[in-house]
């Protein structure tokens, strides 16, 4: 037995409302186990949008994805409060076209690759109704469920008087399986899969010792198990959950006022710069989001995350698959940054936008076959980094 695991198991039940919990060392490990058990060759998994590692594991086991969003989701500057909503009509049409070929429906809270955009609780209810109608499992990626719940509290009138904990429970009770990355959900390392369905638990149970570790630690250290327990309970605290979205909203609005194209309304996880507009002179074949992230690092030391075509993967024939959006994510995790640091990001991103014509493209010089954005190597297509830094030194001097 493990007292630490028992405490974590109770936290999972208290916060996420699920009795059966399988520990894994991080979110992508949960995706591997779920895909291993349920995805067969030729299957299609409908979702509100893919995440990189979810896509990699689903395709690894022979499946594919169908991203079912309303058109509003791809509008950069919008007032729509829930751009992460799944398109209900498209979902039902796909199920009717693919009878027996859909192992589960996946909902991500919140949609990372289109700007951290949340879905509404009513939309999740509608997805659940379709899942029940066709007897299909609903899987919820709850890595950012706290922040999604916070935006439901602020944007969905039905829940304006609810607590964060009540909203989270309403979300998780609609899902057959809930999995998460603890780094995002509880500010710790680790992850997990949880359910109230004992049969589903038993279908996945044996893969935890195979891939992760024993059922009471799943490849997670005792320290991180204790940290995850504390972090899960902190997810119920609105003052903790609101800090990151508030800083993100500040940065999004500040950049918008300076004319920088940025995903609006502000979502969760980070501020997302629209590289398709900032680097409109760079063709998508030369990875504008990657180029913008590289340029920002050169002039600031700020490490943004490319969320565009570099984060995609090639098709089975080796052809490039271009992303729907080319974004640079400026992540703002909980309790990491001060407001002065956020203002520094604002300052340097504004200067870079004013000098965007100096940014050029990138090309791969080393490209791994899977998850290339982790380890791939790129180089500039010209001497544009030198030209950019020459202008930077002219404006700021060598002392910086």
Image (cartoon, helix red, strand yellow):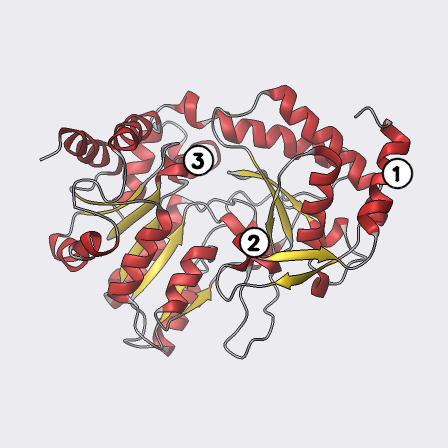
Q: Quadrant of the N terminus?
A: top left
Q: Quadrant of the C terminus?
A: top right
Q: Is residue 141 visible?
A: yes
**Label 3 to label 2: alpha-carbon separation:** 18 Å
| Tag of residue 391 | 1
| Tag of residue 73 | 2
Task: Identify which residue, 81 or 194, lies in the foreground.
Answer: 194
In this picture, is 228 found above or below 123? above
**Label 3 to label 1: alpha-carbon separation:** 39 Å
| Tag of residue 147 | 3
Query: Is 395 left, or right, of 111 in this rendering?
Result: right
Count residues near mark 3 (Cα–Cα under 10 Å), then give few for <14, some for 14-19, many for 20+: many
Q: Of marks 1 and 2, which one's residue comes earlier in the chain?
A: 2
In this picture, is 129 found above or below 273? below
Instruction: Name the element at disc 3.
Output: helix
Instruction: Name the element at disc 1.
Output: helix
Residue at 36 percent of width and 44 percent of height? 142
Residue at 49 percent of width and 59 percent of height? 371
Count residues near mark 2 (Cα–Cα under 10 Å), then give few for <14, some for 14-19, many for 20+: many
């Amino acid at each position: 037995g493990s007292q630490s695991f028992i405490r974590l198991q109770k936290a999972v039940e208290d916060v996420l409302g699920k009795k059966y919990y399988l520990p894994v060392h991080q979110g992508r490990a949960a995706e591997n186990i779920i895909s291993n058990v349920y995805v067969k060759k030729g299957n299609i998994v409908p979702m509100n949008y893919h995440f990189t590692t979810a896509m990699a594991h689903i395709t690894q086991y022979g499946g594919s994805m169908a991203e079912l969003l309303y058109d509003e989701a791809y509008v950069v500057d919008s007032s729509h409060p829930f751009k992460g909503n799944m398109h209900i009509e498209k979902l039902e049409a796909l199920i009717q076209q693919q009878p027996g070929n859909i192992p589960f429906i996946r909902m991500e809270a919140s949609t990372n690759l289109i700007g951290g955009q949340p879905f509404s609780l009513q939309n999740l209810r509608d997805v659940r109704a379709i899942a029940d109608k066709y007897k299909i499992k609903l899987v919820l990626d709850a890595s950012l469920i706290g922040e999604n719940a916070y935006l439901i509290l602020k944007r969905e009138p039905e829940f304006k008087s609810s607590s964060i904990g009540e909203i989270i429970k309403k979300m998780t009770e609609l899902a057959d399986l809930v999995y998460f990355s603890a780094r995002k959900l509880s500010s710790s390392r680790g992850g997990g899969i949880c359910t109230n369905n004992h049969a589903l638990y038993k279908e996945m149970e044996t893969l935890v010792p195979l891939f992760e570790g024993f059922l009471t630690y799943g490849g997670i250290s005792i320290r991180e198990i204790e940290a995850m327990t504390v972090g899960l309970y902190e997810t119920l605290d609105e003052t903790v959950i609101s800090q990151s979205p508030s800083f993100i909203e500040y940065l999004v609005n500040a950049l918008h006022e300076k004319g920088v194209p940025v995903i609006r309304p502000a979502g969760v996880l980070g501020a997302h710069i629209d590289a398709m507009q900032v680097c409109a002179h760079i063709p998508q074949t030369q990875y504008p989001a990657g180029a913008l992230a590289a340029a920002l690092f050169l002039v600031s030391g700020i490490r943004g995350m490319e969320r565009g075509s570099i984060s995609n993967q090639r098709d089975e024939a080796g052809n490039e698959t271009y992303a729907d959006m080319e974004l640079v994510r400026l992540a703002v995790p909980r309790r990491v940054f001060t407001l002065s640091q956020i203002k520094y990001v604002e300052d340097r991103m504004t200067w870079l936008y004013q000098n965007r014509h100096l940014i050029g493209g990138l090309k791969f010089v080393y490209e791994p076959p899977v998850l290339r954005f982790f380890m791939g190597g790129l180089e500039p297509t010209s001497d544009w980094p030198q030209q950019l830094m020459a202008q930077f030194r002219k404006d700021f001097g060598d002392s910086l």
